[in-house]
Amino acid sequence: MKQKRKVCRIACLLCVSILCSSRAYAGAIQDRIDSTGERIDELENVLEQTEQNISAWEKEQRALEQEIAVGQEKISQLSDELDHTKTAIKDTQKEIRQTQKALEQSKKDSKKQYEQMKQRIRFMYENSTNDMLIYILEAGSMPEALRRANYFQAVFAYDRAKLQEFKATTKRIGQAKNKLVKEKDHMEALEEKQTGQLADIDQAVADLKQKLGSKLAQINNSKALKEKYGQELERQKQYEQELERQKAEEDLRREEEIRRQEEELRQKREEEERRRREQQRRQEQDGSSSTSGSSGGGNAGSGSTAASAGDLELLSTIIYCEAGNQSYEGQLAVGSVIMNRVASGSFPNSISGVIYQSGQFSPVASGRFAHALASGLGSRCRAAAQEVLGGRRNVDCLYFRVNNGIIDGIVIGDHVFY
């Protein structure tokens, strides 16, 4: 009998050792899941920020391209204006040369006319005035005398008119030349101004193109980083799914071990109770009056839990963190899992012990549970917590997680319970 009890003790110790090892392994997996989840959140935030940067930079790129297009349009317009100015300068210079030739010719004509007039005057005035008078008086008649007098007067008037005409022409041509010279000077100043403006816009466009090149390089680098982050995010998600699968398998093995242990404990208690009753029966048959073992049934728990206000707050807060966005049935199911663990001999025997057990609930590990507890957010799920504490159980499971199709169990909302 002693040997049998010794073997049972060893078996129990082995089971406890295996169970502790399983818990440690499950805790390690949960730690990796939590760490991977944090990395995924970090990558998603970085990706979102990178996408926002790319969007902003692409907007700047379009603005720069628009500025460059406007600058190039101005360059084209100024180039046309400059070409027109240069052509106008050439045409004006040509007109100035032609006017200069006309001016020189007019001066020659004036000089020639002046010389001819001097010759006629010299011819007519080299002799004395008496000669002219004699020439007029020698006319055979009065009409002839008048004709000769009018002739001399007409010659004088013609010479004076021609001389004035040539002087006026020379003056007009000179004024036209001066006007053309002023126009040429104005256009040359305009050409210089347009050339400067064109150089300034050329430089501005070159600066914009350089800035655009830098912006495009920045966008391309960010897109490369975005692709890299995306690949890393996908790899982390796949790793998280693999960890979830391993955790689910470990949870199933642990649940089977817990059930096996509980069955062994139940059988052991039944065997001890049977032996106790057999011993009591023999004592009664032997006339023994001993009643020392009559109170031994106190070990069998009723399964009820006396909940304090603190337990209610803890339970309602963990339900909020895990199933606040789920249906009421989903909230009851999360609360049922907590209370099933409290009732199980393989988990802590208190609500706080179950909730704070290492590696079991990710909101506790991430700090979200503590924030929700401090903020009183658990009050939103208080009704479900009160009903579970009152004895309501809608699942008899010890585990739950987000349903990813890997685990068979009771699916309620987004969770699978097993």
Image (tube, rainbow, N blue to C red):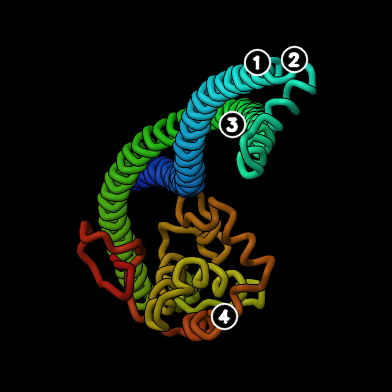
Labels 4, 2: front one: 2
Expressed as whole percent of the image width and height from the top left, the position of residue 14 reads 33, 41
Q: Which residue is mark 1?
A: 119
Residue 175 seen in render: no
Between the C-alphas of marks 3 and 2, the distance is 68 Å
Residue count near mark 4 (Cα–Cα under 10 Å), binned few <14, some 14–19, many ≥20: some
Q: Which residue is mark 4?
A: 380
Question: Between 67 and 301, which is closer to the camera in this rendering?
Answer: 67
* Amino acid tagged 2: Asn
Residue count near mark 1 (Cα–Cα under 10 Å), binned few <14, some 14–19, many ≥20: few
Q: Secondary structure at mark 3?
A: helix
Looking at this rendering, what residue extends furthest in the right direction? 129
Q: Which residue is mark 2?
A: 127
Question: Between 178 and 318, which is closer to the camera in this rendering?
Answer: 178
Between the C-alphas of marks 4 and 3, the distance is 75 Å
Labels 1, 2: front one: 2
Q: Which residue is mark 3?
A: 194
* Amino acid tagged 4: Arg
Residue at 66% x, 73% y: name it: 376
Between the C-alphas of marks 4 and 2, the distance is 141 Å
